[in-house]
Image (tube, rainbow, N blue to C red):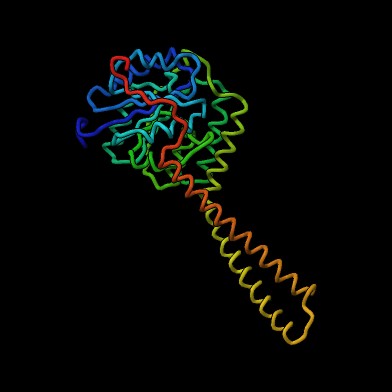
Amino acid sequence: MIPSDAIKISVVVPIHNEQESIFLLIDGIIKSLHSYQFEIIIIDDGSTDGSNQSVFSYNDSRIVLIELRKRYGQSIALATGINYTSGDYIITMDGDLQNDPKDIPLLLKKALKEKCDLVTGIRTDRKDKLLRILPSQLANAIVRLITSLKVKDLGCGLKVFTSELAKSLNFYGEQHRYITLIAHLAGAKIFELPIKHHPRRYGKSKYGFNRTYRVIGDLIIILFQKKYLNRFLRLFGQSGVLLCFLGLLIGLYLLFLSLVGEHILGTTLFWIGLIFVFLGVHLFSLGLLYNIRIRSFHELKSQNTFHIKKITTLHDGS
């Protein structure tokens, strides 16, 4: 196993209105990683309760605070923090103290020993309301049923990634809940380990009933995109080229008939040829536009164009 002092760890923690929790969380992370080189990236996702001031009060140059201009959601906050990291391994966790920093070394040692891409926690005795637990269990069951990923807890926020894997993953909306699934579909080697889960001590949960629909909806989108979308788009592109080719052949045939004096305008064959060309162009364009969209997304991600207001490396409050 790689010696602990030979690697650097980056801990990424998105927060929104966690003023009372964040100081205690940072203190726990520092104690858990005392034998490692590390940095802690706190992403303030539009907090309005003075959470950033609580971070500033912990004067430690290993802590970086990234303040976003407004609230963008946990997925963008998480992606922003991951993009900024410099460690060999990246740890993600929630900022509400429900994840226990004491579990970090357990997951990290597993990642180093097994040389896996991702180690994720299993909240064996989950301290959440039924409104949060039921949709999560449903999503876990769906994933186990239709994929080869036999996970027990997709939504656990405490995870250890290799830097290469974490920075290669694409997620948005509420899809941070499915990072484990996205990593699996990208071919990652994944382990799960049981961890502790605490009830929320401070602040209010950001989870509401309206998110239940989005949780299940995002799961369907991810599975469709990864498993079927590329297949459909390839089929659309090939069908588009074929229809255009048939339309062109029909057009050449009709041109020949017109040269020998036949009336071709308004005939059934004329309209068939026109429809073939029309549908072919549109099907081909669909695949082309999707490829442009994906390329643009990667370019934006590589340029780190998320709306960052300010980045502060803490040291004597500066």
Q: Is residue 206 above or below residue 178?
A: above
Relative side of 253 to 220, left or right = right
| Mark count | 0
Q: Residue at x 24, y 28 (%)?
A: 37
Name the foreground residue: 56 vs 206: 56
Q: Is residue 162 above or below residue 313?
A: below
Q: Residue at x 47, y 16 (%)?
A: 200
Residue 108 position by quadrant: top left
Tell me where residue 159 appears, x and y as whole percent.
38, 32
Relative side of 129 to 32, left or right = right
Farthest-out residue, bottom: 260
Q: Is residue 187 above or below residue 94?
A: below
Relative side of 244 to 85, left or right = right
Tell me where residue 112 appears, x and y as whole percent.
27, 36
Figure quadrant of the N terminus: top left
Q: Residue at x 44, y 14 (%)?
A: 19
Tell me where residue 317 appears, x and y as whole percent.
32, 15
Tell me where residue 64 appears, x and y as whole percent.
34, 24
Q: Residue at x 67, y 63 (%)?
A: 278
Relative side of 101 to 285, left or right = left
Residue 277 position by quadrant: bottom right
Figure quadrant of the C terminus: top left
